[in-house]
Amino acid sequence: MTASQRRWLPVATVALLALLATVTSIGHDFTYDDRGVIFENERVHSMLHLPRLWLETYWPAKYGGDGYRPIVMTLFTLQWTAANGAPWIFHLVNILLAVATSVAVYWCAAAVLPVMGAWVAAALFAVHPVHVEVTGNIVGQSELIVALCLSLAMGLYLRRRMATALTLRDSASITALFALGLLAKEHAIVLPGLMVAAELTVVPKESWRERMWTLRPLMLALCAVALGYLYVRGLVQADLAGFLPYPIFRFLHMSAADRIGTMMSEIPRIAQLLIFPTKLSADYSPNDVIVANGFSPFQLPGYFICVAIVLLALVMRHRAPVAAFGLVWTIVAFLPVSNLLVPAGFVTAERTLFFPSVGVVLVAGAVAEYARRRLAAGRLRLAAAGLMLLLAAGLARSIDRQRVWKNNDDFFVALMKDAPNGYRAHFLYARHIGLKSQLTWMEREYRRAIHIFPYDAGMTLSVADAYGRAGMCEPAVPLFEWTYAIEPSMGEGRYLYVYCLAKLGRWKDVRREAMVGMQYVPARDIHLMHQGIREANISLGRIPR
């Protein structure tokens, strides 16, 4: 084998592993969020709308109008146009991005690890089962682009900082990758934090004055890009987070302390998903999630893990700098989606672990290098066999998991098996089978969801709306009442609520709720509230017919 072949063999095997882990998705349909973001979204079905995507939200207005990801929306438009809306091209792009990202992780890891350690890190990344939610779901392209751009940026940064000085060309390339990542998904904002992590661990020691002088042009450029991005995003998106908080944070009006306590109960699960994901699910919600109400012993393992990781990174900073860098990478990459700083639109989501897992595999690569240097030949062969078994198990699990994302029928059935105690699994399944007119089963699953967790006003409103539109006002009205008791300022569904009250002959309630609703409904619905008040006044004899 020539030197060139030896140099390309690790890259080729990493690419092959990533391909094998994702290629079975090529024949899949638009599934779950793909439906709302792509298949039912007219904005990405025409090239004529392309310029406007840069000043519009990621989600359509009817789904909340959240997020700002113009690069991804542009790619969706190009893919839709190229294949006339066929899903195979979207999945093909996901596969290519997954392969490219795995190779980029290898290139990044090779900047701080020998070839063997870098290969172990990238191979584990390529077959990691927790990645399937990103690679199997088309909307995962945003996560893939961010991971690809930031892995390339960090690979370039580490190479230059480990060997030579950063040039203006290097700074321009890193800045461009940062901008591209931000416009694909907001989580790319962590890049400067990863650079600081590298300076604290793997980059050769310099005085901080020398570091600042060297990095000043790059950091100024990154700050300019970040501020420009936040300004444009602010024109499109009103709040900083960009997404409505998850129902338990929003409707239970949780304090920051209780939100953090809830996440401390989740940290062991998140650690397990990153290290050895035996159980996977597309949704994590109460009762699978323990909602904090003050301090609980269930939170102690989470606090212990968080403190232990920070202390371990500090201890290993000089003895095992690459492992320390991997730990800090995981922390920095996970923080924006951790619910520890600001409430996110989920409690735990496997897709958000895609980029943080790069830090985990960097630690694994450092451990592999340590074992290669320290273990005797016999034990080293045993460790190598264990690694091959782990890669095979990860690959098999990823291939099997891809089947969950084949289409909505398979997805929702799998969701019910994966999260039988989660209220959202029952709610989403009910909504899905309702589209198939399986109304008896739909009602049963709705009732289960509400029984498990009745404090999601969006869910109870959706169920009330389904009842009301089916002409079943008696079960609809109590759900409307409960919804607006949880969230009094909610404007959605108010007219149907007033209409159902009228159908039941509750004219005093019609008048009262129509007057209340006028404060919250969109301007286009105010005349409907006026009409409800007039009908109530006539029925109550306050004005002549």
Image (cartoon, helix red, strand yellow):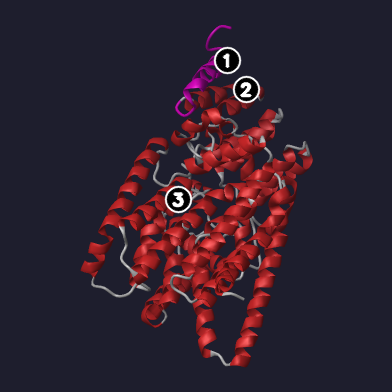
Relative height, residue 28 to residue 533 (above, below):
below
| Spatial separation of the CA atoms under disc 2 and disc 3 | 52 Å
**Residue 346 visible in the picture:** no
Residue at the image position 60 percent from the left and 87 percent from the top: 380
Looking at the picture, tell me which residue is in the foreground, 293 or 397. Answer: 397
Residue 97: where, in percent of width, then height? 57, 53
Residue 306 in which image quadrant: bottom left
The dominant secondary structure in magenta is: helix
The extreme front residue here reads 2
Q: Nearer the viewer, mark 3 or mark 1?
A: 3
Q: Which residues are magenta?
A: 519-545
Q: Is residue 447 left or right of residue 346?
A: right
Crowding at dot 2, Cα within 10 Å, few <14 / some 14-19 / many 20+, comes out as many
Nearest to N terminus: mark 2 or mark 3: 3
Disc 3 element: helix
**Res 407 label:** none
**Residue 95 visible in the picture:** yes
Residue 513: where, in percent of width, then height? 52, 27
Relative height, residue 524 to residue 285 (above, below):
above
- Residue behind mark 1: 535
Q: Quadrant of the C terminus?
A: top right
- Residue behind mark 3: 181
- Residue behind mark 2: 502
Magenta residue check for 333 = no
| Spatial separation of the CA atoms under disc 2 and disc 1 | 9 Å
The reply to whether dot 2 and dot 3 touch (C-beta < 8 Å) is: no
